[in-house]
Image: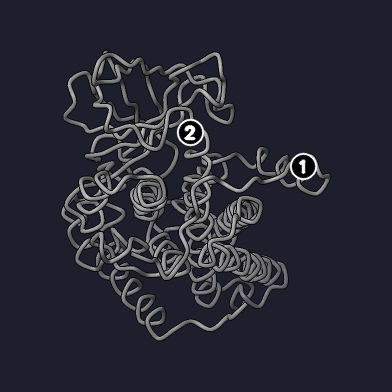
Amino acid sequence: MNFDFSEEQVLLRKTIRQFVDNEIIPYIAKWESDGAFDPAIWKRLADLGLMGVCVPEKYGGSGMDYNSLAIVCEELERGDTAFRTAVSVHTGLNSMTLMQWGSEEQKTKYLMPQAIGEKIGAFGLTEPGAGSDVAAMSTVAVLDGDDYVLNGQKTWISLCDVADHFIVFAYTDKSKKHHGISAFIVERTLEGFSSKAIKGKYGIKSGNTGELFFDNMRVPKENLLGNEGEGFKIAMSALDNGRFTVAAGAVGLSIACLESSVKYSNERQTFGKDIGRHQLVQQMIAKMEAGLQMSRLLVYRVGELKNKGVRNTRETSLAKWQACDFANKAADDAVQIHGAYGYSDEYPVARYLRNSKAPVIYEGTREIHTIMQAEYVLGYREDKILSNMLPKWPFED
């Protein structure tokens, strides 16, 4: 594995870091208070090519590799989790899934406008009674003439009120369980579609999260993604990309925790010396650094596998689990280092702690990933090659 970044990747990191420092960090406190970030920032993200990082140029994207996507997510989450989440959902869960499973007509109609930032994509899998247990979903789709009629509900959907397109999963044949789930491209403008934001979240307060409702919503047959019954495979392949971006973002959160803690440790004094001179503070700083470096190695290893088009469910699961756990612990220690100030909004570390908890839960809880890793080691779980070829970089036309 080559640990050297290309000149393009070095420039990309520098560009995103400057963007975060100038366009996010100065305003994030107000956006948190308002419960939403300025929608105008979508255009600025698009102008930087961040809405289609890994999308091939022929579809309007930047054509960068997967580790470039990791760099983007890492640097955006250093600013705030809400912005990494937006890119994760729009690019990782939606656009990359369209790229892998969509027909040429679907890519032209939906992927291209998303890649250039004209439209926003999102992903609808979780339901009130179906999170880790995907087969427990109750949303159904019934073929009626040239349309599928969808009825049901999704919850904890990022970008619920701002996305234009959603990849939504529903049963087309419940008797087949996992094999009876299908995927659909849903437009917000369809009759019978509605959304509602969830208020009072513990963290990621500037991000839009909520519920989707489908009331006899008619979806054209040509909006079926893949074939009937392939929905579960499509969802799992999407999660391999989504979890990768979540893990990369967790690296960025660890960086933010470490940078804030180092700065404070060199400024705050107790007992006549900088608190960074105290061994127990040094211990927390050292653990942050170790967790950061281990997480980064796991993430970029997954990126290389993705670049080669190699199935990476096991490696992605491990990276997501460990990077998110490390970030959560780093945020907890960052608050401790800041003492009473860490418990206030005067410093950003309280926000880091609130934000760090969600990634430990979504896109596979810590417990789900623990089970997955144990089952791989014990030989109970085996990844079968997906019928659709995994995208390999450089992406071919």
Residue 221 seen anywhere in this rendered image of the structure? yes
Residue 173: x and y in percent read: 48, 17
Label 2 crowd (10 A; few <14 / some 14-19 / many >=20): some
Quadrant position of residue 36: top left
In the picture, the disc for residue 375 is: 1
Instruction: Give the residue type at disc 2.
Output: Glu
Instruction: Give the residue type at disc 1.
Output: Glu
Look at mark 2 in the image and give the residue it sits on. Answer: 230
Counting labels gives: 2
SS for tag 2? loop
The quarter of the picture where the C terminus appears is bottom left
Label 1 crowd (10 A; few <14 / some 14-19 / many >=20): few
At 64% from the left and 56% from the top, the residue drawn is 315
Q: Is residue 161 above or below residue 139?
A: below
SS for tag 1? helix
Q: Looking at the image, which residue sits at the far bottom?
A: 7
Q: In the image, 21: left or right of 251?
A: left
The quarter of the picture where the N terminus appears is bottom right
- Label 2 and label 1: CA atoms lie apart by 24 Å
Q: Looking at the image, which residue sits at the far right?
A: 378
Residue 237: x and y in percent read: 51, 45
- 68 and 27: which one is in front? 68
Quadrant position of residue 150: top left
Residue 86: x and y in percent read: 34, 50
Q: Is residue 68 above or below residue 340?
A: below
Give the colour scheme of this rendering.
one colour
- 121 and 288: which one is in front? 121
The mark nearer the N terminus, 2 or 1, is: 2
Q: In the image, 310: left or right of 343?
A: right
- 94 and 271: which one is in front? 94
